[in-house]
Image (spheres, coloured by chain):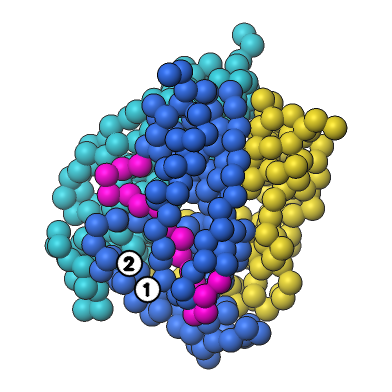
Chain colours: A cyan, B yellow, C blue
Amino acid sequence: MITVQQVLTVTTRGRGTLEITDSIRNIVRESGVGVGLAHVFVHHTSASLILCENADPTVRRDLETFMTRLAPDGASWLEHDDEGPDDMPAHIRTILTQSSLAIPVTAGRCALGVWQGIYLWEHRRAPHSRRITVTVQGHERLD
Amino acid sequence: MITVQQVLTVTTRGRGTLEITDSIRNIVRESGVGVGLAHVFVHHTSASLILCENADPTVRRDLETFMTRLAPDGASWLEHDDEGPDDMPAHIRTILTQSSLAIPVTAGRCALGVWQGIYLWEHRRAPHSRRITVTVQGHERLD
Amino acid sequence: MITVQQVLTVTTRGRGTLEITDSIRNIVRESGVGVGLAHVFVHHTSASLILCENADPTVRRDLETFMTRLAPDGASWLEHDDEGPDDMPAHIRTILTQSSLAIPVTAGRCALGVWQGIYLWEHRRAPHSRRITVTVQGHERLD
């Protein structure tokens, strides 16, 4: 068995989702792992990862609406606002979603469902540079 | 170290939870792994996985009530309804729970807590066939 | 590749977060793994794990406020209260956060972001003893 690790840096354009499926697929393909797991980790507390429907952009728009209703920027019941009204809602959104995803690797490929896309979700209003570590572990592919 | 991977197909009866603990336990036992991790992954964006209290069914009934209050079918603030009023709420419920679970394997067994059961949570109202991949990685058991 | 597994028992003081970053860092350092993953798992359904901002305690206070608004103890719409009014809210909070975290191990260390701390979140009002299993998998460090 082998472990291959690679770092990815993604620049966001402020709040919203950014698809990173292709980058992850490429890292898995180049890892040489045939059967195992691909682990994606974001090193921040105000951006997160989701596996989401990848066909209709209204799905991700509705997710924004949902989160905005649940934890509105500048809500009166929030205390922590050191970096602005979107600071604490960004932490809440991160806590409710994922800091890491693990996806099976089968026959040398990321075994995602047909409608599953991997998205980095930026929760801050301003653009940020987000660091992601991908770790692929498993048996080497026999070509 | 070894990696063993197996696919499971579960037919749901519409919205609700379905316990799959025994199936996962069996796959772990048959994998031959003594110490490691068992990873369970669902290949869909409107069904998810939870580790939940396994004794009293009212717990899972209350989870349904909670999610229904949080993201009601047909809510006026939701845009995406291509497959009906339960389409977008199903994506929201998936995002708020897990697409994958990883459970320690200890002494050749799934090391769940006494009250932890593994459940597939169908979020759509209609029955669906759901594909699950189980990946077990670790040291071989020495019998 | 190697797998190292260790059990940790944490005594909580009732509802609230408890930082366990140092304990996890130590287990990773002692595991001898250089590149891989550290997996942290809590064997309970009313306590969970989060990766959270580790600098300002108001962040975790706001998380409590958020969860209390979302699933208040003794809410009229909850049925399950066998162990008291905080029983079912504790299960809901667990479901919405994580029962396990996986963190990359890089150069023999837990590769957390600068602001990421690992917290055990006790969701019951009374103190509890919580069992955690840490599994580290990867290539041995070459010193």
Q: Amino acid at mark 1?
A: Glu
Asked if residue A128 is among those painted magenta in the image, a careful observer would answer: no
Residue A103, quarter of the rendered image:
top right
Nearest to the observer: residue C136 or residue B71: C136
**Compared to A69, does C52 lie above or below?**
above
**Please, is residue A107 above or below residue A115 in the view?**
above
Q: Is residue C98 left or right of residue A12?
A: right
Q: Which residue is mark 1?
A: C64
Rendered image: mark on residue C60: 2
Q: Quadrant of residue C4?
A: top right
Where disc 1 sits, the SS reads helix
Pointers 2 and 1 in contact (C-beta within 8 Å): yes
Residue in the picture at 43% in, 54% down: C20
Q: Position of residue C10 (x, y in %)?
A: 52, 61
- The magenta span reads C112-128
The answer to whether residue A50 of the structure is visible from this angle is: no
Query: Which amino acid, by three-letter code, is at mark 2?
Result: Arg
Left or right of residue A58: residue A135: right
Residue drawn at the location 49% of the way across and 48% of the way down: C101
* Whole-percent x, y for residue B6 in the image: 73, 35
Query: What count of labels does the image hold?
Result: 2
Distance of mark 2 from mark 1, alpha carbons? 6 Å
Q: Who is closer to the viewer here, A67 or A93? A: A93
The quarter of the picture where residue A142 lies is top right
